[in-house]
Image (cartoon, helix red, strand yellow):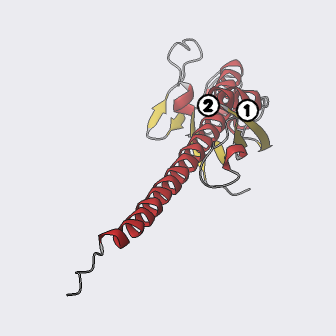
Amino acid sequence: MIPPRRDAGQAFPIYITVVAGLLFLALAYLAVGQASVNRSGAQTAADAAALAAAQNERDQLTAQWVKVLPDPAKWQDIFEGGGAGNSCWRAAQFAARNDAHAQCTHPEPLRYAVDVQTDKPVGDSVVPGTEHMKSKASAIAVVEPLCTFELPDGNAGKGALPQLTCRDRNWDLNPDDLTDLPKPQDLFDVHLANDER
């Protein structure tokens, strides 16, 4: 009589191979996740750095506008970005807060372009080379003037200030009482722009 065949021993190597393959896939997905988190951190750092530089310029422009308030002929230059310094130092500060370092350019008034690289690499994983790989990201922020005005004609009276229209609000500025002035966010909007360098 022929003894029955036993297949139990043959299935074990297949089982081990399948488990090893699944484990490798899990580790590979983990590596992809690590890289994704690192890249997301780089983009957050770039966005924050660009916005910080643009917001600092907005605050500078507002301060300049308040200084020249009695002379409306100088307003337009300020709304076009004149008189503000380069705020790239703010971008560097914010990138450092997000564990990255930034290269910032101020290619034109009211616009900041920032490239960042994370300080920390992706880390060890089953994917070779990731232990030293650092993520990079870019962002552009712009300062957008929100106000329009018309210079007063000669009949408006000495010292008369034009009405300032910012979005859907009108500001009637009284040269004798300048306590109620628009805030920086009333005069300028700061936002991220598409990467068009």
Quarter containing the N terminus: bottom left
Q: Residue furthest bottom?
A: 1
Name the foreground residue: 178 vs 118: 118
| Label 2 with label 1: CB-CB less than 8 Å | no
Image point 69% across, 58% down: which residue? 196
Quarter containing the C terminus: bottom right
Find residue 98 and name its label.
2
Residue 179: x and y in percent read 52, 12
Of helix, strand and loop, which one carries label 1? helix
Find residue 73 and name its label.
1
Residue 38: x and y in percent read 59, 43
Residue 136: x and y in percent read 69, 47
Q: Is residue 8 visible?
A: yes
Find residue 12 and name its label.
none
Name the foreground residue: 145 vs 44: 44
Image point 79% across, 29% down: which residue? 85
Q: Amino acid under label 1?
A: Ala
Counting residues from the start of the chain, the first of labels 2 and 1 encountered is 1
Label 2 vs label 1, nearer the camera: 2
Query: Where, by quadrant of the figure, is residue 174 drawn?
Result: top right
Residue 48: x and y in percent read 60, 35
Q: Residue furthest left?
A: 1
Image point 53% across, 44% down: which residue? 37
